[in-house]
Amino acid sequence: MSLDASEVEKIAHLARLGIDEKDVPDYAENLSRILGLVEQMSVVDTSHVEPMAHPLALAQRLREDVVTETNQRELFQENAPAVEDGLFLVPKVIE
Amino acid sequence: MHSKTLAEISAGLQQGDFSSVEITRAFLDRIERLSPELNCYITVTDKQALQAAEQADQQRSEGKAGPLTGVPLAHKDIFCTRGVKTSCGSRMLDNFIAPYNAGVVERLDSAGMVMLGKTNMDEFAMGSSNETSFFGAVKNPWDLKAVPGGSSGGSASVVAAMLAPASTGTDTGGSIRQPASLCGITGLKPTYGRVSRYGMIAFASSLDQAGPMTRTAEDAAMMLNVMSGFDSRDSTSVDREVPDYTANLSDSLKGLKIGLPKEFFGEGLDAAVADTVQAALKEYEKMGAELVDISLPNSGLSVPTYYVVAPAECSSNLSRFDGVRFGYRCENPTDLEDLYKRSRGEGFGEEVKRRIMIGTYALSAGYYDAYYIKAQKCRRLISDDFTKAYEKVDVIMGPTAPSVAFNMGEKTEDPVSMYLSDIYTIAVNLAGLPGMSVPAGFVDGKPVGLQIIGNYFDESRLLNVAHQYQQVTDWHKQTPDAYK
């Protein structure tokens, strides 16, 4: 499996990753190499194998539907790049 | 004082040979002198350390000290530490001050351990050489031209250079065991679910597990006693009794069945490393263990399978870094999409971006079955091989890494060659089993690690098997000349 420049740009867009145009050929080469490695999976027949999502066959734990977190907005927002009146600031999204 | 093991420091504090403030100061002095060259710490928390040490001495004087009260350690910079920068080796989190403590940090704090600082690591734990860190590469104390391994390279380097008696690490595909091997220390990755992942910055959630990195198996047992246990804040934490991991260290190995997978001794393994591992196996035979040839026929699928599963999970986990709520934000974004793209593009390094893209691709419409589901099926085959093997043997042994520490820059050009440094460790994560690396000798003056893999929740046996080896060998007592 080999990726071309337009596919790399599409994947980068899906992942919302800005990459420099000059770096695209390098990404295409390295990602193609990694996919080449990954393709070694095709040597085994897995048609009758159940997929394994998790190492321990556990059921998801449930808990009571009660409040467990206290409000620490100010503490958490100390790490935010831009905040005003307790709100996170982003560039304008609605005209 | 700095050459003491965790157990020796614990005993020294109990007998009043020295105080926690004295031993903490001794390590801080060494860190100040020797850490810049190795680049093994990202943050040194000297003031907090001395405060915590004073508190520990106070507790001791009141008769309230436990075995680890006042004993210093370092934390990998992947664990959230309240009020202290937690960078995960990334520009993305260079400005992040954690607002809470990770479960592991909480437990070690409550045991009275004193944090010396946060260790360098591959960015978001993605790497096998500690060269992907935003804060620069870490050096191997045995050879400053060589890598310390990764991703817990800083943690391995500080323990090997005795800039901390022990450190925490995390292991997603070998990130505790491989650097432990390359730096000549003892490292343990517990069973998935044994140690809380709460507050441990997520890379691949179905694989990540935290564990101790120490000089001896006894020290690892002491730390694991504190690190293990149920945490309701981690949905995959296992609610299961924690045994005293130091209780069975002295058990005899007579009759122990050691499985040797033929796949771990074949092509790709350095011949001198193979000889070193064979010599270690002879020691086990002398102790009464029985060597059994086994096969893990699907282990060749581990690396390909891992490089779908781990990137898929990482692409999802790292989507939280959006330049809005915390972490790096680009200058003057023109609109929301520009904000996301440039914050992530500038905040993440190359290897992280590569893995996010592989994961995004593997999960995208049209490719999901061919990559992600296929990988999950291969994962089951790999895991089933181990289940079958443990019907016949008690533990599995082999090399931790295919070679000794390689030189910096040697594998950075080709990501796939870097990925193959983990050929013997990755299957263990895919299956969720516990694994260890213990020092077993040297090749060209660089350490070789013996890997010991156990059955689920069989950490006591692993530690016993490692400890017994350390009673009849002194590889774990070797220290690099420049850091004696």
Image (cartoon, rainbow, N blue to C red):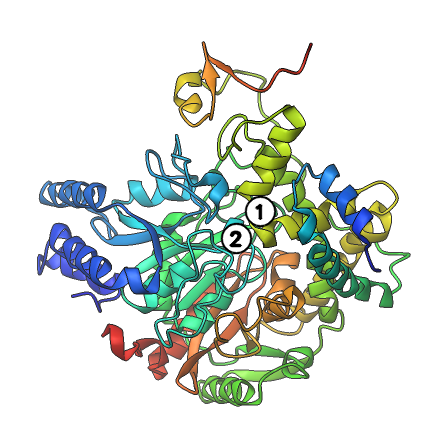
Q: Which badge, 2 or 1, is on the more N-terminal residue?
A: 2
Q: Is residue B108 left or right of residue B281?
A: left
2 and 1 marks in contact (CB < 8 Å): yes
Identify whether A1 is placed above or below A72.
Answer: below
Quarter location, residue B121: bottom left
Residue B222 picture location, percent across and down: 34, 57
B302 or B90: which is nearer to us?
A: B90
Please report the residue visible at 70 percent of the width from the left and 60 percent of the height from the top.
A30
Please report the residue visible at 45 percent of the width from the left and 46 percent of the height from the top.
B78
The 10 Å Cα crowd at callout 2, few under 14, some 14 to 19, many 20 or more, is many
In the image, are marks 2 and 1 on the same chain? yes
Which image quarter holds the N terminus of chain B?
bottom left
Q: Amino acid at mark 1?
A: Phe
Q: CA distance from mark 2 to mark 1?
A: 7 Å
Label 2, secondary structure: give it: helix
The 10 Å Cα crowd at callout 1, few under 14, some 14 to 19, many 20 or more, is many
Reading the image, the residue beneath label 1 is B203
